[in-house]
Amino acid sequence: MKAMKTAAGCGAVLALVGVLSGCSAEASHRNGGDSSSEGAGGPGGPGATGGPGGPGPGGTGGYDESFGSVNPTTTGGTGGGNPGENGQQNGESCDGKFTGRVRDFKEEHPDMEPQDVGKCSNCDDHMIVTDTLGEDLKPIYAGGPDGTMTTTGKANFDMWFRDMEGVNMPKNITLQFEDPDRDGVWTYNDQLFFPIDNELFGNEGREHNYHFTFEMHMGFEYKGGEQFTFAGDDDVFTFINGKKVVDLGGIHAEQTTIVDLDELGLEVGKTYQLDFFFAERHVTDSHFRIDTSIEFINCGVEVK
Ligand SMILES: [Ca+2]
Ligand SMILES: [Ca+2]
């Protein structure tokens, strides 16, 4: 399995996408402020996430309506969820820096190293989430009471992307995308994606801090012709306009998915949201690469 991961690395993405370059492009993640310095207001509250970066009040306005405030050309706001923090401004000043939220788990969580509770730790699993994003901008669990091949049920899954004291520890991090050749395809490439080593719950005696999730929420104006490519291992779910477009659910060797936005029925000139979810649930690798020609209009929106 490890050999597969290595073999299917950067070159595979290059071959598939063609237009990409800079396989060796620098990738870095840097800390984007910690969770203890968040702004006032609760999850989804307009005070916490208002402005062009904000998804609006969670769960109250439906998906499209909640996204309506994101377009910076229609508001006088000053930026995303935490202006001045995490570099969250409107897209023109992102410089490829996009902020998302990591949640660290301990290995003891049943969905982490699920072989410990009789589940598969080497299986594709496309039954984990439904095809539609929840109104709270979180994936909806699709498994039954007994879970899925690699997961253990709704209650445990619902912890993956929600702050839960005692269960997980959150932290915002900023990923630095690069476009050194200025072809409009921005790349984040980290073949050792361990952004919280020695932090939060710590490494638990391992070389890295495994067992964590990561989510990002960005808006964009659809221009036509964009692509979004992800390559990596363990679960990835990506939603555009509230519909699932990437499902790499399960625990598996590196896989690559290319989303051609022209196939999604989007309307040129309109704004849409991209919601990205990742989980690292099983040692030992953590590969993470995104290539995209989408021009985002915010730099990441905090959704707790
Ligand atoms: Ca490029
Ligand atoms: Ca951990």
Image (cartoon, rainbow, N blue to C red):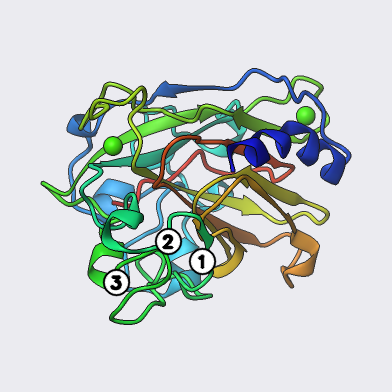
Residue 93 higher or lower than 103, as above or below: above
**In what element is the residue under mark 1?**
loop
Instruction: Identify the amino acid type marked 3.
Output: Gly
**In what element is the residue under mark 3?**
loop
Q: Comparing marks 2 and 3, which lies closer to the viewer?
A: 2
Instruction: Identify the amino acid type marked 2.
Output: Cys
Residue at the disc numbered 1 = 125
Instruction: Identify the amino acid type marked 1.
Output: Asp
User: Residue 243: x and y, percent?
Assistant: 57, 71
Residue 39 higher or lower than 58, as above or below: above
**Label annotation for residue 120:** 2
Mark 3 CB in 8 Å range of ligand 2?
Answer: no
Q: Give 18 or 209, whichever is nearer the viewer.
A: 209
Q: Mark 3 vs mark 1: which is more N-terminal?
A: 1
Residue 10 occupies which quadrant of the picture?
A: top right
- Ligand 1 in which quarter: top right
Q: CA distance from mark 3 to mark 1?
A: 13 Å
Q: Residue at x 87, y 37 (%)?
A: 19
Q: Are marks 2 and 3 in contact (CB under 8 Å)?
A: no
Residue at the disc numbered 3 = 153
